[in-house]
Image (spheres, rainbow, N blue to C red):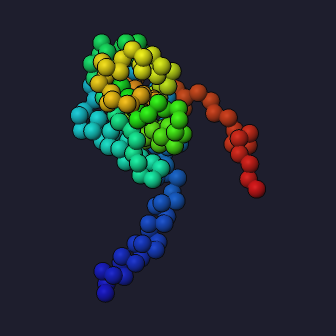
Amino acid sequence: MKKRMILVLFAAVIMPSFAQDSNNPGFKAIVNHYAARNFVSGSIARSDLDAIIDAGIRAPSASNRQPWHFTVVQNLDLAQKIVPQTQDGNVLIVVSSSGDGKTNGSQILDCALATESIYLAAQALGYGSRIYTGPMNTLNSRFKSDLGLPSGYNAVALVRVGRVQAGVDAVSAASSRKSANDMVTYK
């Protein structure tokens, strides 16, 4: 009986206050992110890389279709052909989708959710991350075979993950954001 009372107390009092706390680490990872520009050399632990990929795999998708494929580019020469500023130890995670990437909006949205999950997971683990969509036409026309993208898949985004200069954070490195008053309507 005593254990049951403690569980009920925990569920009723402690859990709701934790979930609604703006100091929650998950919430902080979402609101304190920034697109890193100041990458430096240095490797990423394999366990961290696996956790980052797992965050993408666990992203939500329409009807749980999970239309994505992730290609992890650790080869510096290949990575620099795609993103010239890539530093030694940086990783590019290419998110690709089946189909032409234009006919099914939900596939693109699903891949975008996976991309953001990867981006946020990297930052939650202390790495810098940056989402790129600009190189996709070049990547799809020139590097699909080099990357080994599955047949019928096209890249829709990539996330660069790596170490960043010490002391850089969302306050010192992020671009300014528009005010919520300019972007939100409540009815």
Foreground pick, 23 / 154: 154
Q: Is residue 180 above or below residue 150?
A: below
Task: Give residue 31's position: percent from left, percent from top.
Answer: 53, 42
Total count of labels = 0
Q: Is residue 54 above or below residue 173?
A: below
Residue occupying the point 40% across, 26% down: 160
Foreground pick, 120 / 94: 94
Residue occupying the point 32% across, 30% down: 150
Relative side of 67 to 180, left or right:
left
Task: Give residue 125's position: percent from left, percent from top.
Answer: 35, 39
Residue occupying the point 25% across, 33% down: 45
Foreground pick, 170 / 37: 37
Foreground pick, 136 / 104: 104
Q: Is residue 148 visible?
A: yes
Q: Is residue 185 above or below residue 52?
A: below
Task: Give residue 66's position: percent from left, percent from top.
Answer: 39, 45
Q: Quadrant of the C terminus?
A: bottom right
Residue occupying the point 31% across, 20% down: 145
Q: Quadrant of residue 38?
A: top left
Task: Give residue 99's position: percent from left, percent from top.
Answer: 44, 34
Q: Which residue is most to the right?
A: 187
Q: Which residue is most to the bottom?
A: 1
